[in-house]
Amino acid sequence: MTLDMKRPVDMREVIARIVDDSAWLPFKPDYGPGTVCGHARIEGHAVGFITNNGPIDPAGATKAAQFIQLCNQSGTPIVFLQNTTGFIVGRASEEAGMIKHGSKMIQALSNSIVPQVTIYCGSSFGAGNFGMCGRGFHPRFCFSWPNARTAVMGGEQAAMTLEIVARQQAARKGTAVDEAQLAAQNAEIVANFERQASAFVTSGLLLDDGVIDPRDTRAVLAFVLATAREANRREPRAVQFGVARL
């Protein structure tokens, strides 16, 4: 069966298959429902989850920002399960303050000090890659599922954008559009984007710490959470004493 990135996957079901007893507590489930946040445990380790069921909208960004702050207050590690086409675009979302609310999420993420682990589960397009703690935000660990796709945008969106430009240029010049050439160009763009967005290509560019089997996600998360906890215990403490010969 061909992988269809347009086919939605309910990430709440993914969380239920990773956490202890399939039990987790959603955070504000009816507010910005496209962004999913919640608390759970993995082999006893308390953890917060942030993931997506679609693009990140103003309400979802605000909810994620508050959730990140709360996890930092309680010292709870955060697991980001990336599955988004990015921050939502369009006049309505811009008028609703998408830039302002999105910046709150980025600000919270930039100042977060708890251990953070990122897994690319599906699409990871555009600024959504950064907003969901991509490699640029230096998570403690970062892994990909084989089906993950990371790119500035989807191949079809890129081809459509360039097609619109080509048609507008032809209209200004008063010339006819070569439909066959345009179709060939679109196919080449889509193929190029799909190849470069592959998890194995991006992993080869060190944009993650490796590709993992989705069935091993729980075991991998349990191991890295234990590693992060041990690292925090071994962190040197600042010396508060005056200088003395002992």
Image (cartoon, rainbow, N blue to C red):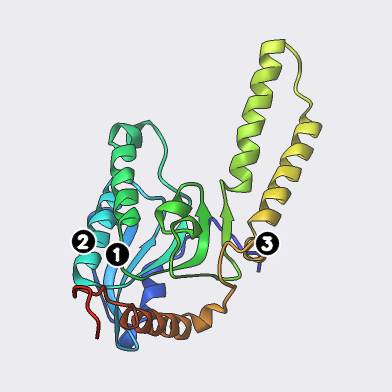
Q: Which residue is mark 2?
A: 28
Q: Position of residue 47 (x, y in %)?
A: 30, 76
Q: Earlier in the sequence, mark 2 or mark 1?
A: 2
> As rendered, which of 97 and 77 lies closer to the eye?
77
Q: Secondary structure at mark 3?
A: helix
Residue 2 is drawn in which quadrant?
bottom right
Classify mark 2: residues with Cα within 10 Å, few (<14), some (14-19) or many (20+): some
Mark 2 and mark 1 in contact? Answer it, CB < 8 Å.
yes
Instruction: Please tell me whether mark 1 sits on a helix, a strand or a loop.
Output: strand
Query: The residue under label 1 is which amino acid type?
Result: Cys
Residue 17 shows in the view: no
Pair 3/2: label in front: 3
Q: Which residue is mark 3?
A: 201
Left or right, 91 with reference to 245: right
Q: In the figure, residue 165 lies in which quadrant?
A: top right
Q: Amino acid at mark 2?
A: Lys
Does label 1 or label 3 sit earlier along the sequence? 1
Q: Which residue is mark 1?
A: 37
Q: Nearer the viewer, residue 159 or 232?
A: 232
Residue 5 appears left or right of 132? right
* Number of numbered markers: 3
Q: From the viewer's perspective, is residue 121 above or below residue 93?
A: below
Residue 97 screen position, x and y as percent: 28, 36
Residue 74, percent from left and from top:
19, 71
Q: Secondary structure at mark 2?
A: loop
Mark 1 crowd level (few <14, some 14–19, many ≥20, 10 Å Cα): many
**What residue type is disc 3 on?**
Val
- Disc number lying in front (1 or 3): 3
Please say whether residue 174 is visible from this viewpoint: yes
The label number, if any, that marks residue 219 in the structure image: none
**In which quarter of the view is residue 156 placed?**
top right
